Amino acid sequence: MSTYDILDQSYSRVAEEYATRIFAELQHKPLDRQLLNQLADRTRGRGLVCDLGCGPGQVARYLYEQGVDVMGLDAAAGMVAQAQQLNPGIPFVQGDMLALNIPDSSWVGMAAFYSLIHIHRHQLPQAFAELKRVLQPDGLLLFSFHIGSETLHLSEWWEQVVDLDFHFFQPVEMTHFLEQAGFVLEETIEREPYPDIEHQSRRCYMLARKP
C-alpha cells in the first residue's frame, strides 16, 4: 500500500476527532499566526495559495480571513470532508503531494504545516520538486516540521487503528533538500513547544521561494 493510501485510510478514521481537537489550535500559537500573516501579506491579491496537508482546514481558514485567495488539499478523504463542513466557501480537494494533479505554476504560495513529516527522507527530493513545479516564479513555500532524527510510529490513535509514521528532521538536512530542488531559503525559525497544547517537540519553520 502506498504512503498516500495509508494516510488516506488512517487520517480518515480519526478525522472527526482530529477536527474537534485541532481546528482551533492557531488561537494558542502566536508564532504560527505571525508567519501566516507574513505569507498572507506577500501573496494577497497575487493568486491562489494552497494549504497543503490541510486537515480540517484551520490554516486555510486563517489565510482566508486575512483576505487570501486560498484552497486546501489533503491525502485523506475524511479530512477533506471535515474541512468542507467547517469552512464553507473555501475549496478543498483530495490529493497526493508527491504527484499533484495541478498544472505547472498554478499557485503563488503554499503553507505546509506538519504535512511533510509523513514523507520519508528518500522521497523528500521528489516532494520538493513537485511543490516547486506547481509554484509560480517568486512563489512562496512556508512549512513546518518537528526537529530531530527519529521516526515516531502510531498504530492506534484516539481508539482508532492507524498506521502512521511521523518523521522528524534536522534543519540542515531540510535546507539541503530545498536547495537541491532549486528553492531559495529565505528564513528559518525554531521554537520550543507550547506547553499543554501540542506534542512536546522542538519545531522548525522555513520560508522558501521559487526563483
Image (cartoon, rainbow, N blue to C red):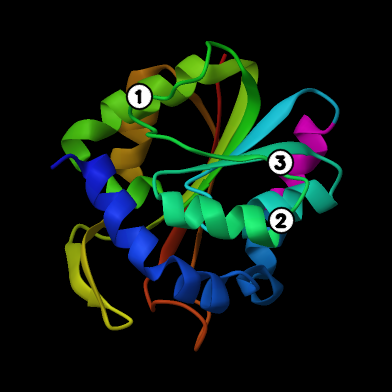
Q: Residues within 10 Å of mark 2 (few under 14, many from 20)?
A: some
Separation (CA) of disc 2 from disc 1: 25 Å
Q: Position of residue 19 (x, y in %)?
A: 54, 70
> Circle 2 is placed at which residue position?
87
The image quadrant where one finds the N terminus is top left
Q: Amino acid at mark 2?
A: Asn
Compare marks 2 and 1 and give the one earlier in the sequence.
2
Q: Nearer the viewer, mark 2 or mark 1?
A: 2
Which residue is denoted by mark 1 in the rendering?
99
* Amino acid type at mark 3: Leu
Q: How many marks?
A: 3
Q: Mark 2 and 3 residues: CB-CB less than 8 Å, in contact?
A: no
Q: CA distance from mark 3 to mark 1?
A: 24 Å
Q: Is residue 114 visible?
A: no
The residues tagged by marks 2 and 3 sit, at their Cα atoms, a distance apart of 20 Å
Disc 3 residue crowd, few under 14, some 14–19, many 20+, Cα 10 Å: many
2 or 3: tag closer to the N-terminus? 3
Residue at 42% over, 16% down:
182
Magenta segment boundaries in residue numbering? 36-44
Q: Tell me: residue 64, above or below residue 109.
A: below
Q: Which residue occupies the foreground of this view, 152 or 7?
A: 7
Q: What secondary structure is marked by label 2? A: loop
Q: Residue at x 50, y 89 (%)?
A: 196
Q: Say which residue label 3 marks.
A: 39
Quarter containing the C terminus:
top right
Along the viewing direction, whichever of 125 and 189 lies nearer the viewer: 125
